[in-house]
Amino acid sequence: MPTIPDLETQAKDFANKITNIVQCFDDNAKAFKVDILGKEKTHSATVEIYNDDGFSLFTNREPNFHIEAQWTCRYDAYGQWLRVERSGFKVFNGIEDKRPIFRYEYDSANGQNLPSAHIHFHGDHPDMNQHGAFDNLSGAFEDCGDGSPRSKRRQKGKKKKLSDLHFPVGGSRFRPILEDVLLMLIEEYGINPEKGRKETIKLLEENVEKWRTIQAQTIVRDVPSIVVNTLKEMGYTITPPLEGVKPDRREYLTQR
């Protein structure tokens, strides 16, 4: 079997991959850094991958958008591979903008009450509220019921902004990655990558394919019985392992 790289090597490979992507859009973007907190060879080691200044996206050679991205990672449950614990991508309307238009976030610790993968829309941002559509949201928040701790806090006047809401986007297994967000911005806003549109889209799509392949493999391990039954319906013959069939981890199917 091939040797599994250590935590620092995996983290630097990840940071280099992100740097290569970012510099397709912004030649002047700084490289992403790696900080390892705690003892590297233990499950408690935490890896921070970040860029202090973010990077810009250009249309017609003008920097129209600015993105800040960061990841917090640890070893997986087997102590072998880097796993993302938290991530965040903030999209601003230019480098001088103080508030994001929207932000994609992932937090594996959110549990069952809040979606681990989610989007926050900043309805008070001028570009999100050009026609005043979100001006009267406070009334909607005042009508909250008392069925959850968060709704009770809103009844008391807390967490009453649109940006406080967590809009789910696929859970831990099917969540978008930075490349998905960049592909969306290229299409919706006509972003012109400095390294060329065609070449950049190809790189982004290749990374998305790799990510989704890994996630598909993870889903197979999560619920092998569903996979086996589906393959049998398709005409495959399945031989169970000698050590016996592992139980499904169906909690991942309902994890938000």
Image: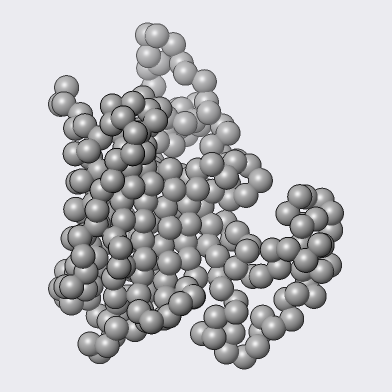
Q: On the image, which quarter does residue 125 sit in?
A: bottom right
| Snapshot colouring | one colour
In the figure, 102 relative to 208: above or below? below
Q: On the image, which quarter does residue 231 sit in?
A: top left
Residue 233 in view in this figure: no
Residue 1 in view in this figure: yes
Task: Give the residue displayed 21% in from the left and 65% down from the top.
Answer: 30
Task: Give the residue displayed 20% in from the left and 46% down from the top.
Answer: 12
Q: 180 or 130: nearer the eye?
A: 130
Position of residue 208 measured from the top left corner of the image (x, y, whole percent): 31, 55
The quadrant of the rendering that contains the N terminus is: top left
Task: Give the residue displayed 76% in from the left and 50% down from the top.
Answer: 149
Lateral position of residue 235 relative to residue 110, left or right: left
In the figure, 157 relative to 152: above or below? below
Position of residue 28 measured from the top left corner of the image (x, y, whole percent): 18, 73
Lateral position of residue 66 relative to residue 11, left or right: right
Position of residue 169 measured from the top left corner of the image (x, y, whole percent): 52, 56
